[in-house]
Amino acid sequence: MNAPEPDELPGLDLHRLRAYLDVETPGLVAGELTGELVQGGRSNLTYIVSDGTGQWVVRRPPLGHVLATAHDMSREHRMLTALAGTRVPVPRTDVLCQDDSVLGAPFYVMEYVPGTVFRAPEQTDRLSTQQRSDLSFQLMDVLADLHSIDPASVGLAEFGRPEGFLERQVRRWTKQLKASHSREVDGIDELSQRLADQVPTTGRVGIVHGDYRLDNVIVGDDQQIKAVLDWEMATIGDPLTDLGLLAVYWEGFSGLENNPIAKGIGPEYGFPSAEQLFTRYAERSELDLSDVNWYLAFGFFKIAVILEGIHYRFIHDQTVGEGFEHVGGLVAPLVAQGLATLKEA
């Protein structure tokens, strides 16, 4: 990596970061830092920094408008630290900084894990049919392993409030929607209300990732998942919310033009269907999936709200990266699919 110009890394001051790390983690960094912004993320900002010998990852919230309960660095850091040593692969955490004077917002530093994050058809095209199948089912196995962990066994008993979890989730994302309100979206209020009126009974309480999908894992050269990333929305609650969200990413964006969010995955790219993924997950987790359509519909609603928040930041020049100009156009089609899924149920 080349040393960046000061305006090339918005949200990251390498000199302040180096000074902070020298005090808080003596010996971690051995020289002047260089860095680069990791493209592809649509929420928190992620940078890879290096001292010429070692590499680390820095995570911080986006610039400007930040929703009240989103982008919590301490929450993400705590989850990664708790899962170290479990069957769920995660990067090692090095330090959490909650002092805004360093980078202008809380941030944490973690291990750099080499590998591939599959975000585009050009990447998944290189996989054989067998590799696509194996990776898909491995993704489900890791998710089932996560959901099988007793939160108390890894120090997360008080991490969330599982009672009334689904009801609160619907209320939370409805509130998030209002916080990023900049236009009318046809059907989104109806979807919110119908989800609130049809909340199913939770079958198992477990650790919920909150944004589990293929491009939130790092895959090694041996086609094994080396790390699960992006734990900012993690909590304790109904694990089937992860399953519904994954299925929306897997198939819900199929046929949508100018889609920068979920590309190169799903049946249209030679991967197993969402139904096949459900079967693998059910075998591994032994959970009842009879109410899966509600979780699918909630997944459509949640992603629609997240994208509406990104759209808000984009039109107010409060985000960095590529592809944001098309995000707003995806919201209404996702809402329509959510309503259709509930009607099928």
Image (cartoon, rainbow, N blue to C red):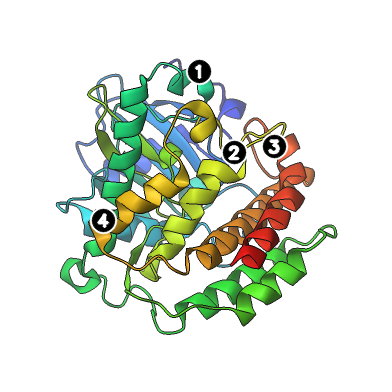
Whether residue 196 can be seen here: yes
Counting residues from the start of the chain, the first of labels 2 and 3 encountered is 3
Residue closest to the far front: 344
In the rendered image of this protein, does residue 239 appear above or below residue 133?
below
Secondary element under disc 2, as helix, strand or loop, is loop
Residue position for label 4? 283
Q: Nearer the viewer, mark 4 or mark 2?
A: 4
In the rendered image of this protein, does residue 102 appear above or below residue 325?
below
In the rendered image of this protein, does residue 12 appear above or below residue 233?
above
Q: Residues within 10 Å of mark 3 (few under 14, many from 20)?
A: few
Could you tell me the amino acid type at mark 2? Ile
Residue 166 left/right relative to 324? left
Q: Are marks 4 and 1 in contact (CB under 8 Å)?
A: no
Could you tell me the amino acid type at mark 4? Glu
Distance between the alpha carbons at the discs numbered 4 and 3: 31 Å
What is the x, y in percent for residue 149?
Answer: 21, 64
Q: Nearer the viewer, mark 4 or mark 1?
A: 4
Q: Are marks 4 and 2 in contact (CB under 8 Å)?
A: no
Residue position for label 2? 261
Q: Nearer the viewer, residue 50 or 304?
A: 304
Whether residue 312 can be seen here: no
Residue position for label 3? 256
Residue position for label 1? 122
Distance between the alpha carbons at the discs numbered 4 and 2: 29 Å
Point 28% across, 46% down: residue: 23
Q: Nearer the viewer, mark 2 or mark 3?
A: 3
Q: Nearer the viewer, residue 113 or 130?
A: 130
Q: Quadrant of residue 259?
A: top right
Q: Nearer the viewer, mark 4 or mark 3?
A: 4
